[in-house]
Amino acid sequence: MAQLLGLMQTGWKLAIPSIIDYAARWHSEQEVICRTPEGPIVVSTYADLRQRALLCSMALKSLGIREGSMVATLAWNTTRHLEAWFGIMGLGACCHTVNPRLSDKDIRFIINDAQDCVILSDITFAAQLERILPDCPAVKSVVFLTDRQHMPQKCNLLCQVLCYEELLDGQISGPPFHWVDVDENAACGLCYTSGTTGNPKGVLYSHRSNYLHAMVAVQPDNWCMGSSSTCLAVVPMFHANAWGTVFAAPLVGAKLVLPGPYLDGESIYNLMQSFNVTLSVGVPTVWMNLLDYMERFEVRFKSLKMVCIGGAAAPRSMIDTFEKKYGVDVRHLWGMTELSPLGTVCGVKAAIAGRPQEYILANKVKQGRPHNLIDMRIVDDSGRVLAHDGKTVGNLQVKGPCVVREYFKIGKPAVDSEGWFTTGDVCSIDKLGHMAVTDRAKDVVKSGGEWISTIEIENLAMGHHTVAEAAVIAIPSPKWGERPLLLVVLKPHIQQEGEHETIKEELYKHLEGRIAKYAMPDDIVFVPEIPHNATGKVSKLVLRDMFKEYKPPRSRI
């Protein structure tokens, strides 16, 4: 029997420019607020943003950009940066977001790998470009996202240097421009991983994958975003597309607040208060700084309802502070650049909603359940599928329409024959579908046949009142193979060295009974800071190198 086809309209493409078209038509007066790199706060609307994005497309076309061209951005979360995104994608070109926190070596690599021909940059990165571009021959033009008054002086980039506002002004009297009619499966964005074990790898997003991701993100069990929401997009646009926040907000007509380069606790708090932010998304270090500022100045939120925390595990102490002290709902997230990036969100499932608060908060430490466009499983090292019982631990695999199939220019599948992508995370999944990350496979401590979760120890240590940040790494042990070493940054008011031994014993007592005896760190070392990589995660590769010769005074087992 022949297949019976539906009689609904076809040809409606899931193309990114249609998101801003919708916002400009049906939420035209909704505000887009930006703290600019130059300092002032600028308020515009979705209608303004769309019009300027069209001018950006025209300007890029005048520079020779066409369908399939690679255009890089090196910029903070600003309105101009977002205009450029829609302008690039609306021309059928691909927007390559360059992470300025990468090393110069890695930035050179990804610009050359992508073959970017134009770079749109914030003025704050002029000196960085001067160092990098002499070795990037494909780059023909750099456009600084500013006006003539703030253009960098004496900037020698060995290519054409242009002013963004002047470029747009030059298009105002030109003929009307319409977005290029692109295939929804065409590439629209390129984001590279942070390259902790080699050169960064490129993840090439399609219009369709980004559109679907935005539709998933706004759902009630995820970010619960609508036209009455005000979203502060803290996570940088160069970090996995700001986790999709800058597509999700216009998709539903939410007010969007962009912080620019100002990510300190005071600046974030002031934006939240000034513009009645209800929702914000970011990594734990941002929230740590915000909570520290609020504690020191004894201030509270007036409008914030939800924070979404991802990029690294959120410690229980942070979740407790938001929920108990400030009444803010915490949604723990997990994802990867390769997933567009959202994979799981830990909301409160109906089955546990009536449980005591302590039970619910303990559950929120987990990374959550997959959204409806992700399938997920855990397997052992031989590929055998493992039980979802909340106890069995295995290698996490995912698949779905927003998951990478192949890395850019690698030329071989990133998935197995069934389409499963191995994430590199070691996890458990419980009967209700909550996934909990035990560790990254490369970070877990393998001690005497036991696998020790560094994340569990870190989260417990962060719950001690003296600890600002904690990290656990494996150090060699002639008897056990590996043993855990706990590295601690103390809070600013507890930095006197004379107190270290006392605090160390307090920390050991704090951990006793909460972790297995074999998991007790062999030593606790106090450090002035813990290094982070380009995406804000703790750089355990650097820490392992720093402490590769470290010998603890004695083993704790």
Image (spheres, rainbow, N blue to C red):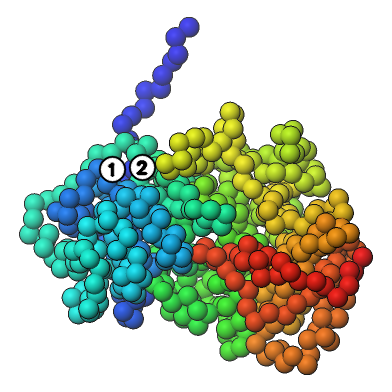
Q: Is residue 334 left or right of residue 339?
A: right
Residue 129's mark?
none
Q: Is residue 5 above or below residue 95?
A: above
| Residue 343 in picture, x, y percent from top left | 58, 48
| Residue 406 in picture, x, y percent from top left | 48, 38
> Would you call the spot at circle 1 few (<14 residues within 10 Å), some (14-19), or many (20 or more)?
some
Q: Secondary structure at mark 1?
A: loop
Q: Secondary structure at mark 2?
A: strand
Q: Residue at x 68, y 79 (%)?
A: 527
Q: Quadrant of residue 186?
A: top left
Name the residue that disc number 2 marks: 187
> Would you call the spot at circle 2 few (<14 residues within 10 Å), some (14-19), or many (20 or more)?
many
Q: Residue at x 59, y 83 (%)?
A: 294
Which one is in front, 546 or 505?
546
Q: CA distance from mark 1 to mark 2?
A: 8 Å
| Residue 354 in picture, x, y percent from top left | 75, 56
Which quadrant is home to the C terminus?
bottom right
Q: Quadrant of residue 142?
A: bottom left
Is there CB contact under 8 Å for labels 1 and 2?
yes
The three-letter code of the residue at mark 2 reads Ala
Name the residue that disc number 1 marks: 68
Q: Is residue 532 above or below residue 342?
A: below
Q: Is residue 133 left or right of residue 492?
A: left
